[in-house]
Amino acid sequence: MFKVTNTGTDRLDIELRGKLNADDMRVALDELVEKSQGIENGRMLYEVVEFHIPSLEAMVIEFSRLPAMLGFMQKFSRAAVLSDKHWLKKISELEGTLIPGLEIKAFNRAQKAEAEAWLSS
């Protein structure tokens, strides 16, 4: 499951549970683009409840939409990632160093209040 919620004029909350197949990935990417319309200098709270590597077909869909996703990422200046997986937090923060203008900070899922405070600062 991939759920995207607008929680303000400049914020998206994203929740990922389980494994994404190709159809799930199409819907998720479309929803991200749609719900980010009009956002500038935005913030994202990304909560990974259960992480499973997406299916190969889902990854192909994601790579095929890379230009649109790069445009999507430019709308945001900060992203907080909530996860209990140490390696996933490290990869998230590494991704932040590769995307100009986007700062990504990872937190344990129990640190949601700290993540919210960081996003607001």
Image (tube, rainbow, N blue to C red):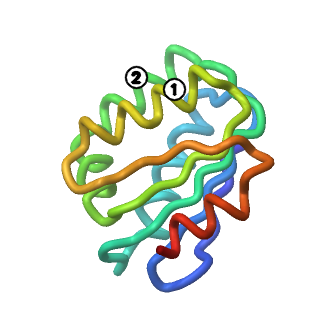
Residue 58: which disc? 1
**Which residue is located at x 52 percent, y 75 percent?**
120
Residue at x 66% of width, y 60% of height: 114
Q: Is residue 77 left or right of residue 56?
A: left
Hey, which quadrant is residue 20 in on the image? top right
Callout 1 crowding tier (Cα within 10 Å): few <14, some 14–19, many ≥20: some
Say left or right for 79 vs 88.
Answer: left
For residue 26, above or below residue 62: below
Q: Is residue 22 left or right of residue 63?
A: right
Q: Position of residue 61 (x, y in %)?
A: 42, 30
Asked if the residues shown at circle 2 and circle 1 are in contact, with their CB atoms under 8 angstroms apart, the answer is yes
**Residue 102 coordinates in the image, percent (x, y):** 30, 53
- Residue at 42 percent of width and 48 percent of height: 104
Q: State the mark number for residue 89.
A: none
Residue receiving disc 2: 60
Disc 2: CA contacts within 10 A as few (<14), some (14-19) or many (>=20) = some
Q: Position of residue 8 (x, y in %)?
A: 56, 83
Using the numbered discs, state the Cα–Cα distance from disc 2 to disc 1 in whole angstroms.
5 Å
At label 1, the amino acid type is Ala
**Left or right, 58 with reference to 60:** right
Work out whether residue 96 or residue 61 is closer to the camera in this orientation and state it. Answer: 96
